[in-house]
Image (cartoon, rainbow, N blue to C red):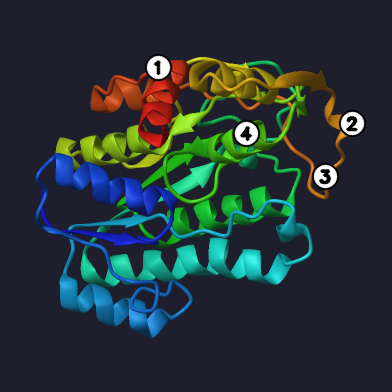
Amino acid sequence: MGKILVIGAGGQLGQCLKIVSTRRNLTDIVFPSEADANILDQAGLQALLSKEQPAFVINCAAYTAVDKAEDEVELAKAVNETGAANLAIACAANGAALIHVSTDFVFEGNDVKLLIEDDVANPINVYGQTKLDGEKAVIALLKEHFILRTSWLYSEYANNFVKTMLKLGADRDELNIIADQVGTPTYAIDLANAIFDIINADSDAYGVYHYSNEGVTSWFDFAKAIFDISDTKVKVNPIPGSAYPTKASRPAFSVMDKTKIKKTFNIEIPYWRDSLVECIAKLQ
């Protein structure tokens, strides 16, 4: 398998990779601090990769504050595009393959169809555009790349929709949740397992892949499932997105087709609700 280096180790996916690496008894894996693995520090990245000589680098570092990105355009661009480019350059110089995590928000999401990797990406917010530009930078600078687009990421770690809903559900009697934005939740532990499966495959099938849990849901139905599974007594009202305006527009339908990643790496993907049950059991 070779040595693995995780960039963005302190974030949600980074913490899940740490948990899964322990479960899999992976010992040749390094989780540097943000100070030691700053993707905006090109020279520092070069020095880190030169020292560690990883076979694979996993990039979990990203600017993910979707609404704030509309105001912090330069910062989002720096982290999501320039940072990705810096990492690709360092990987190319040190003979490492890069697994780079991207998002369903690269799509406009106006058509009700399963999105495949070759569909035209047309982001409708700054976050999505900077992530798409990061993908393009990786593709241009490094042949040995696996770009994984994922969606609606949650886990026991960091801030995410599941933890927010559990907190709000405990404090309130009633909640209004958007019902006309449809996608697929992804348990970050499942994504971490898929990443290690890709590394384990020792494949040169480089390119862009889609990964989320199986199935389709809305934010409203996702919230309902969270409350049902956790036995939280709260009334949930479905509302249109127009009733809850946000600074950044969201795709209305961003369900991704996972056929390519399943066939290429022989990966079995859990159904979203089954994974949610597992996560909530750990949170409780």
**Image check: 80 left or right of 282?**
right
Percent x, y for residue 192?
32, 40
Q: Is residue 168 above or below residue 218?
A: below
Q: Residue at x 29, y 19 (%)?
A: 268
Q: Secondary structure at mark 1?
A: helix
Closer to the eye: label 3 or 4: 4
Percent x, y for residue 18?
26, 51
Query: Mark 2 = which residue?
Result: 242
Query: Mark 3 = which residue?
Result: 246
Percent x, y for residue 101?
44, 48
Q: Nearer the viewer, residue 2 or 34?
A: 34
Between the residue at mark 1 and the residue at mark 3, the CA separation in whole angstroms equals: 30 Å
Q: Residue at x 32, y 42 (%)?
A: 206
Between the residue at mark 3 and the residue at mark 4, the CA separation in whole angstroms equals: 24 Å
Closer to the eye: label 1 or 3: 1
Q: Earlier in the sequence, mark 1 or mark 2?
A: 2
Query: Mark 4 = which residue?
Result: 170
Q: Earlier in the sequence, mark 1 or mark 4?
A: 4
Q: How many marks?
A: 4
Quadrant of the rendered image containing residue 188: top left
Q: Are marks 1 and 2 in contact (CB under 8 Å)?
A: no
Between the residue at mark 1 and the residue at mark 2, the CA separation in whole angstroms equals: 31 Å
Instruction: Give neighbour class at mark 1: few <14, some 14-19, many 20+ (Cα, 10 Å).
Output: few
**Image check: 276 left or right of 56?**
right
Percent x, y for residue 164?
60, 40
Q: Earlier in the sequence, mark 3 or mark 4?
A: 4
Q: Residue at x 24, y 73 (%)?
A: 49
Q: Secondary structure at mark 2?
A: helix
Can the viewer see residue 147? yes
Residue type, numbered disc 4: Ala
Closer to the eye: label 1 or 4: 4
